[in-house]
Image: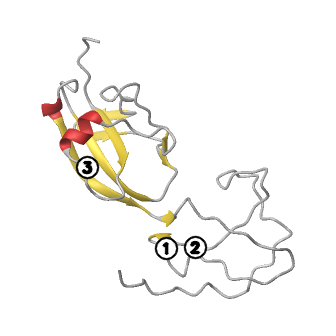
Amino acid sequence: DGQTHSRELKLLFDPEGTVSEEDCFLDPQDVRAITGHYCLTTTDCKAPTVSSDEGHVWSNVKVHFAGMYAVCYCDVNCNSQAYWSFLQWHLVAGPYSNHVWHLSREIHFDLRITGWGLSANNRLRIIDEAHSCGEPAASSSQGVELPPAPPTQLAQRAA
């Protein structure tokens, strides 16, 4: 497009921890994984909300899936691969998004939830299917009975 883009930030889902500076330049940011920060092309992303001598701030960015993300940045001439940098990996804690359960009514069961950075202090909230977890109006479902004690943290299995 002929424009010189600057101050570009990309968050790339990187579960294997393999993103390189070349990937930072070439790979698109996943629109399903990140909201509040968008990229029109692989080198033209939303400008910082605030920029100063102390750095840049992108406000209201939301990550929807737990896992490892590569933080990529370009300050000037972002249409050129040479100016893209891999800054760091960032771990987003939470349950994996691919859980599937098949349960029957009125039967007690164990519910196993796996993910990144989970602890015994985490809590499970079950809501009606008409809502999303992040909604303020999403009240806990009245049809679910949960045990009164915190969950048991299971040890990681050896690979």
Residue 132 at x, y = what percent? Answer: 69, 51
Q: Secondary structure at mark 1?
A: loop
Residue 29 at x, y = what percent? Answer: 39, 38
Q: How many marks?
A: 3
Q: Is residue 56 above or below residue 79?
A: below
**Label 3 sits on residue:** 19
The first of marks 1 and 2 along the sequence is 2
* Measured Cα–Cα span from mark 1 to mark 2: 9 Å
**Which disc is residue 65 wearing?**
none
The first of marks 3 and 1 along the sequence is 3
Towards the viewer: 60 or 3: 3
Displayed quadrant of residue 27 = top left
Left or right of 16 in this view: 99: right
* Measured Cα–Cα span from mark 2 to mark 3: 27 Å
**Callout 1, which amino acid?**
Leu
**Callout 2, which amino acid?**
Ile
Q: Secondary structure at mark 2?
A: loop
The reply to whether residue 130 is in sight is yes
CB under 8 Å between discs 2 and 3: no
| Label 1 crowd bin: few (<14), some (14–19), many (20+), radius 10 Å | some
| Label 2 crowd bin: few (<14), some (14–19), many (20+), radius 10 Å | few
**Label 1 sits on residue:** 118
Query: Which residue is painted at 27% across and 43% down in the image?
Result: 72
**Callout 3, which amino acid?**
Val
